[in-house]
Image (spheres, rainbow, N blue to C red):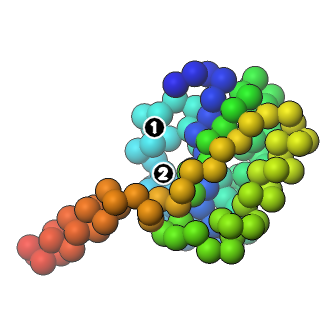
Amino acid sequence: MSEGHRIILLAHGSSDKRWCETFEQLAAPTVNSVAGSRIAYMELATPSLEQIVEQGVKEGVQTFTVVPLFLAAGRHLRKDVPAMIRSLEEAHGISISLAPPIGENPRLGVAIRDVVEQELAK
């Protein structure tokens, strides 16, 4: 991946630290193996999407891809996040693309099946 591009795994966010820790663990394999990738929260937790984008801009990043750690596209992904992205693009003169929510990827369904089979094997 180009150093001028950053992947942002976007979770909703919560004031409950345990909730955030779950998403940080979920993001860890990507953050640890995909150069420049980060986790960010839409609200209620830090780092925020805005903080991660601003940090990237300071480091010379010009393009970002936001991968939502959401199971489906509700109001947040249809309205709130695109509005945040437009605002950040205008403020910093950068390009941010929004990937589909992770729940729309068929590989997640396979992973859920694997977890269920693991539970049944106990």
Q: Residue at x 87, y 36 (%)?
A: 92
* Residue 48 seen from this side: yes
- Return the residue nearer the eye: 19 or 92: 92
* Picture quarter with the C terminus: bottom left
Picture coordinates of residue 2, whole percent (x, y): 57, 21
Residue occupied by mark 2: 27
Amino acid at dot 1 = Asn
Helix, strand or loop at mark 2? helix
In the picture provided, is 114 more to the left or to the right than 10? left
Q: Nearer the viewer, residue 106 or 34?
A: 106
Q: Quadrant of residue 42?
A: bottom right
Asked if the residues shown at circle 1 and circle 2 are in contact, with their CB atoms under 8 angstroms apart, the answer is no
Name the residue rendered at 53%, 60% in the picture: 101
- Along the horizontal axis of the image, is 30 left or right of 84? left
Looking at the picture, does residue 58 appear above or below residue 95?
above
Count the labels in the image: 2
In this view, which residue lies farthest toward the right? 91
Is 28 or 72 nearer to us in this picture?
Answer: 72
Return the x and y of residue 76 as percentages of the image width and height.
69, 70
Specify whether 50 is left or right of 15.
Answer: right
Give the residue number, with chain letter if any, for mark 1: 32
The kind of residue on which mark 2 rests is Ala
Residue 76 vertical position relative to residue 38 in the rendered view, above or below:
below
Q: Residue at x 68, y 74 (%)?
A: 75
